[in-house]
């Protein structure tokens, strides 16, 4: 067989094997950077393609805010404060340079535990927490975290701190994710992952 045809045949085999490999492991490659998470490779946007806003200092401080009410004050009870503190610690320990510090005043992040009405739509839907970052251009200025309390015990306090980590990560400009098994899932925050996704750790280490 002609050497030219042998090279073409070998090239076709290599290309076919590459396509099968990509399909088998559902690999999506965009730009130069890919991060493997088990058998899944999630794409990471390169920083020169997206001006990701960042906090410009460390540590990022936070405090628990008490809100006056007709019946006294709304505040985070100790079990909730423990979960929130644990969420901050997990994110800090999962990264190289992100640091948090609880303070009494002049905080970067204000944490509230307050009542919130339950909203019913066609499907039963409950908002149990919200995050409101203040962003100016490429800089994150401050943030507010709201953890809502209800009369239902399972919505008030649980042993999971996934919701707390989810909301804190919103303050780093991470959005809700369609990946139902990830920490940024917008569907189920009661699955108790107890950790942040590898691709989020990677991105935070790239930024800070």
Image: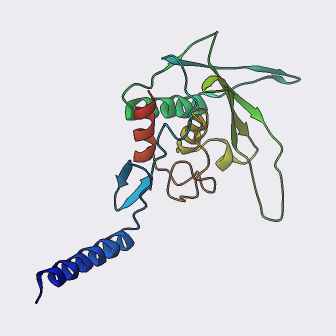
> Which image quadrant: the N terminus?
bottom left
Q: Residue at x 53, y 58 (%)?
A: 179
Q: Residue at x 23, y 75 (%)?
A: 11
Q: Is residue 135 left or right of residue 32?
A: right
> Which image quadrant: the C terminus?
top left
Front-lying residue, 176 or 44: 44
Q: Residue at x 75, y 51 (%)?
A: 126
Front-lying residue, 194 or 71: 194
The image position of residue 40, as x and y in percent, is 39, 60
The image position of residue 189, as x and y in percent, is 58, 51
Front-lying residue, 199 or 186: 199
Front-lying residue, 18 or 44: 18
The image position of residue 172, as x and y in percent, is 57, 33
194 versus 53 height, above or below: below
Q: How many marks?
A: 0
62 versus 31 height, above or below: above
Q: Is residue 85 left or right of residue 76?
A: left
């Amino acid at each position: 067989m002609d050497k030219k045809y042998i090279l073409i045949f070998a090239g076709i085999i290599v290309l076919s094997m590459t396509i099968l490999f990509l399909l088998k492991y559902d690999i999506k490659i965009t730009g130069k950077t890919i991060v493997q998470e088990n058998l899944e490779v999630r794409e990471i946007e390169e920083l020169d393609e997206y001006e990701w806003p960042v906090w410009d200092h460390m540590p990022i401080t936070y405090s628990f805010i008490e809100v006056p009410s007709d019946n006294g004050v709304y505040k985070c009870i100790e079990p909730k404060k423990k979960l929130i503190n644990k969420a901050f610690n997990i994110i800090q320990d999962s990264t190289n340079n992100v640091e948090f510090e609880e303070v009494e005043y002049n905080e970067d992040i204000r944490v509230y535990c307050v009542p919130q009405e339950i909203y019913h739509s066609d499907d039963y839907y409950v908002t149990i927490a919200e995050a409101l970052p203040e962003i100016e251009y490429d800089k994150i200025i401050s943030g507010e975290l709201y953890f809502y309390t209800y009369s239902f015990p399972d919505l008030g306090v649980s042993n999971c701190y996934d919701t707390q980590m989810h909301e804190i990560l919103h303050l780093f400009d991470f959005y809700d994710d369609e990946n139902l098994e990830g920490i940024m899932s917008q569907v189920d925050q009661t699955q108790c992952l107890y950790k942040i996704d590898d691709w989020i750790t990677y991105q935070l280490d790239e930024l800070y």
